[in-house]
Image: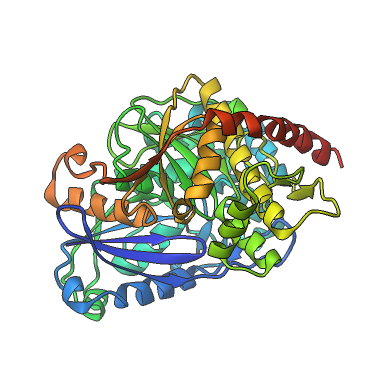
Amino acid sequence: MFLGIDIGTSGVKAVIAAQDGTIAAQASAPLTVAHSHPLWSEQDPNDWCAATERAVLALRPELRAQVQGIGLAGQMHGATLLGHDDRPLRPAILWNDGRSFAECATLERAEPRSREITGNMAMPGFTAPKLLWVKAHEPDIFDRVRAVLLPKDYVRLHLTGEKASDVSDSAGTLWLDTAARDWSDPMLAASGLSRDQMPWLHEGTEIAGTLRADVAARWGMKPVPVAGGGGDNAAGAVGIGAVRDGDAFLSLGTSGVIFVATERFRPNPERAVHAFCHCVPGMWHQMSVHLSAASCIDWGARMTGTDAGGFFALAEQAGPAAGPELFLPYLSGERTPHNDPHIRAALLGLGTDSDPARIAAAVLEGVAFAHADGLAALREAGTTVEELAVIGGGSRSRYWGMVLAAALDATLVYPDGGEVGPALGAARLAQVAVSGADPAEICTRPPTNHVIPPDPALAEKLAPKLARFRAAYAATRSI
């Protein structure tokens, strides 16, 4: 048995997977996010550790006792700043925090080869601009920083005592030479930092620590190895077997991602496409990233007084393109292709006959249109995507899948257990680390539950709304 732990934004998920990849048990514990100022998004790092403890202890003791290794996945980019005692100096600044927009320009001026080295445009979501913001606005804290860890790696420190990370998660800091899979001294210097403040780097399939004896005793386990793991999207790719060139998936979690595995480093920073290391050796990946996906469903459910299931049912009741209502899903700004932390969501085209069902349909369509923009940016970079596996909580709705397939002009494949996502991938990385097996042997595709091909008639029906959606971004941005 192998334990996978995913430190997400809204909660920590823990799964125990058997050697054949089947899920033996899963549990979760919720997290909250603080938005104390406009554009700010923060969490207390110790809440991640407490939620991890709750999620793991909710798993059956007899299964925990059989665990041979642990893998970690987690939300990317979060800046966890530690002092000399390895305690957080301030709340962690999260991936969807937009305060450091000005610092992105500062960083790229300080190191003009930034995009060439990292393969990415500097964006407020990445870690490096956050540190420049702290340096400018909280200099006393910046001067006390002895280590910077990503969220899952702070949990690793709690579990193992080791300051370590993997190359897939670390590629999202803007401190990595992504082609070389190593820290970049010029990018660190541009941020006022050095290698001494960075964790040791590992491949996701390597052992990067051992569970401390006291934690093992509490969890009813042996002091088992802890794998390097991966950023949430790379680990999600491992969970659904996207480890070969051209394998692709669509993640519908709090944020939304289209992920394509590549056998070489293939950046396209000018269109805000992310190019990172994969968490399996010798592979990279491209992503279009959208800061709001299933979070729009949660928002819409609150606005209409339903839950997520009821909101999907409302949308299906109205049907696609049922009215002129148009939703721009930028609740927390946007990355691909706009790199705009200041844009906000909008609901347009309302009339006296607008009702909750048509608004729900518009929300689902708006998220689908944002992903169509992202996929267009990937295709402009020369990436061919005809089929996408679907993972994340949003994968539960077949109606939404129909809308997405038409908007993206791609076949959607729904694997069994797709809603588990990164936690299963983390467990698989642990299995590879412990066994020494070829990742391709372990990271196979799970059985397919169902397939949704694109419907040309529906795509034609949605096309005018997609055109209005693209015009609406420019119009709302101007005000």
Residue shown at the point (37%, 53%) measured from the top left: 422
Seen as rendered, the residue at the extreme bottom is 218
Rendered location of residue 39, percent (x, y): 71, 56
Name the one closer to the observer, 281 or 214: 281
Viewport quadrant of the C terminus: top right
Rendered location of residue 458, percent (x, y): 58, 34
Q: Is residue 173 above or below residue 247?
A: below
Tell me if 309 is positioned left or right of 63 in this view. Answer: right
Q: Is residue 111 visible?
A: no
Q: Is residue 12 above or below residue 371?
A: below
Viewport quadrant of the N terminus: bottom left
Q: Quadrant of residue 417?
A: bottom left
Q: Is residue 367 above or below residue 213?
A: above
Residue shown at the point (70%, 52%) measured from the top left: 358
Rendered location of residue 277, percent (x, y): 39, 36
Q: Is residue 142 above or below residue 66?
A: above
Name the one closer to the observer, 113 or 280: 280
Residue shown at the point (70%, 67%) measured from the top left: 36
Tell me if 302 is positioned left or right of 232 in this view. Answer: right
Tell me if 271 is positioned left or right of 420 in this view. Answer: right
Residue shown at the point (70%, 65%) measured from the top left: 303
Q: How many marks?
A: 0
Q: Quadrant of residue 408?
A: top right
Name the one closer to the observer, 185 or 42: 42
Name the one closer to the observer, 472 or 381: 472
Q: Is residue 383 visible?
A: yes
Tell me if 436 is positioned left or right of 239 in this view. Answer: left
Rendered location of residue 177, percent (x, y): 44, 33
